[in-house]
Image (tube, grey):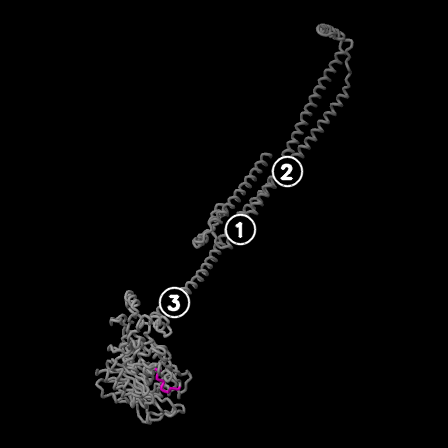
Amino acid sequence: MKNYMNNENKDINNENKDINDENVSINKENIDMNNKIEVQEINDENESIEKEVPETKVDDVSVSSELDDLEVVDVSAVNVINEMKAEVENADREVNNEEVESQNMDNDVTEVNAEAETVENEVNDKEPESLNLEDEMAEVKVETGNAENKVNDEEAEPQNIENDATEDGDESKNIGTKEDIDLDNIKIEEIDLDAVRKELEEEKYDKQKLERELEVLEKNILKQSDIFETDIILDAILKEENLISQTAMLNQKKINEAADSNELKVNNGIKLNKKKKTHNKAMSKVLVAVTSVFMALIIYIIYFVMIDSQSKLNNEYNERSLLLEETVVRGNIYSSDNRILAQTIEEDGEWIRNYPYGSMFAHTVGRYEKGKTGIELGSDFSLVTTKDSVLDKILNDINDEKSMGNSIVTTLDFDLQKIAYDALGNKKGAVVAIEPKTGKIIAMVSKPSYDPNFVTKNWSVLSNTDNTRNSLINRATSGLYPPGSTFKIVTVLAYMRNQSAGTYSYQCKGTHNFNGFNMQCYDKKVHGPLDIVSAFANSCNGAFGNMGTIIGAKNMNKIAKDLMFNKELDFDYGYSISKFDLGASADETLLAQTAIGQGDTRITPFQNALLVSGIANGGDVMKPYMVDKLVDGDGRAIEITKQKKMKSIMSNKEATFLKELMRNVVDNGTAMGLKDLDVEVAGKTGSAEYNDEGDSHSWFVGFAPADNPSIAVSIIVENGGTGSESAVPIAGRMINGYFNK
């Protein structure tokens, strides 16, 4: 029994030791786990965790391997791991408490064993006493037998006594040799056999009683030992089961913690992924924002260099230009045939700007004093820069001389400019001539004009707001006028895009009623039955008013947008934006008026020139420009303007149809005054009423030759009456002058 209990205790101790080893291993693994947290491997770890979690085993090896793989970056994961460590430490303390209890149990077992040994020793001590009693009883029995023999001998015959005496005598003789014995004094004590028997019986009873007590004691000891052994075994079994259960629970807890950790890692991985995604999203937003800003900066730089730089560099308040002029003589401005249109000369020790042709180029070349305008402003920076070498600049500084600035060669045709200037005479108005295929502005005149050589002298008059002449305004680019019948080009194009132009018909009666508004053709002329071609040639107001009501406000607004109304233009000089204003709920009256170029529509002569140049060029409007090239002091080209398309406003088919309509205007309509020119002309006249008295401006827009245009013109004569009266003759002179140089 003792051996069994000792073995059980050893087994329990071994299990406790194993549990301690496991706890130590787990602690080491937790420490290793904390040391292995790495952010870069989180995505790979998520995949391995997802595979490992379902395969989690009870054994410590799998727990260890899983714990080894745990790598958590998130702060929350670290907190969870710390909590797990605390729980493991609590488990260690519980195991240690169990070890103490087991040790106490061992001590109890040891005490029981000691008590058992004590009992056994007492039993062993009792056994010798019992044996001694038996020996004494045997000795008593021997003595009793001897006593009985003595009695028998005393009752024997005298002969025997004598024989005995003789023998005794012999015996005494033998003894007497050593010591004298007094036989007379020898007394034989009488023995009480009954007392002896009684004593023996008492001793026997005591022995039996002792034996019974011993048996009872042994039974009690055995019973207590069995009970204690059973209790110990049961307790050991219970403790073993508890240990197994706790171990299993601990292992399960480890597994659960590992699984939770894995799940936590997965969740944290997901969270980290989400955080990564959120972080990546945030970074993406930041990157997009930075990229957008960077791209915006690049776009702005490109825009600044390509488009806006000139306006900034050429700003009249640009101090850099003013500083450059201290060491650089402002360059010249030339016509396309190299005539000087502006130059810097020295007069009475001062450098002054001179314009040899006075007011003829005032609005195109511009002025230098009292605020730069025209090319003087648009090319300001170029005119005060120089290609002189550093050595030349140093020598000029030493000699107190200025370097010669770069010069501008314009696209302006001197002869054509003079024709336009002279043709306008004293009338107010503007003339614009463009090459449709290149975008070159070859003539631009605005009347009334002024002499830029005397701007400072005449400034008080020129700048007076009460000056009805408004000489400083370039009417070609900044004057906004009702387009009159020239807008019927737009109306026809809108009708073509929304209806069948070939099937249009109208019966003109000279007067037309649109929702109570009576519209008349010029001079109340009755045109009779018309198709779209004859209606355009005769500029029938009734027919085009009717078209406007069919087209509707929405489609009219769309076509106006396509033709660059209400939009900024790609042009390097000052201009006004043409206006088209037709509400979606416009009634028939306003639709009819708008369709014939009245109402609230306003257009510049410059944009009307772009419109007809687009038709002449098959639907493409080229970017208009007046500076052909930049040259140095020796006339070598530094920069040449590249031609490019600004916008496609219509298809080639539409442009071809409009060309035919405009050709028919010259051949059979209101512009027949141009029919006898050396080249075939296509165009459209217009009379634009500008007051309630019926006064009108005279318009003509067109191009030549009609089949392969090389020049497009836009002419307006303020208060000039019909187009055929004032504008058409100027157009004829311009076109003849262009082709008969």
User: Which residue in the protein does label 3 denote?
Assistant: 297
Could you classify mark 1 by the number of other residues whose Cα lies within 10 Å: few (under 14), some (14-19), or many (20 or more)? some
Q: Is residue 460 magenta?
A: no
Q: Relative to 286, does residue 53 appear above or below in the rendering?
A: above
Q: CA distance from mark 3 to mark 2?
A: 94 Å
Q: Quadrant of residue 577?
A: bottom left
Residue 303 visible (yes or no): no
Magenta part of the chain: 466-473
Query: Mark 3 or mark 1: which is in front?
Result: 3
| Depth order, front residue of 344/137 | 344
Question: In which quadrant of the rendered image does the C terminus lie?
Answer: bottom left
Judge left or right: residue 599 versus residue 206: left
Q: The residue tagged with tag 2: helix, strand or loop? A: helix
Could you classify mark 2 by the number of other residues whose Cα lies within 10 Å: few (under 14), some (14-19), or many (20 or more)? some
Lower position in the chain sequence, tag 3 or tag 2: 2
Percent position (x, y) of residue 189?
77, 15
Lower position in the chain sequence, tag 3 or tag 1: 1
Residue 734 visible (yes or no): yes
Main SS of the magenta part reads loop
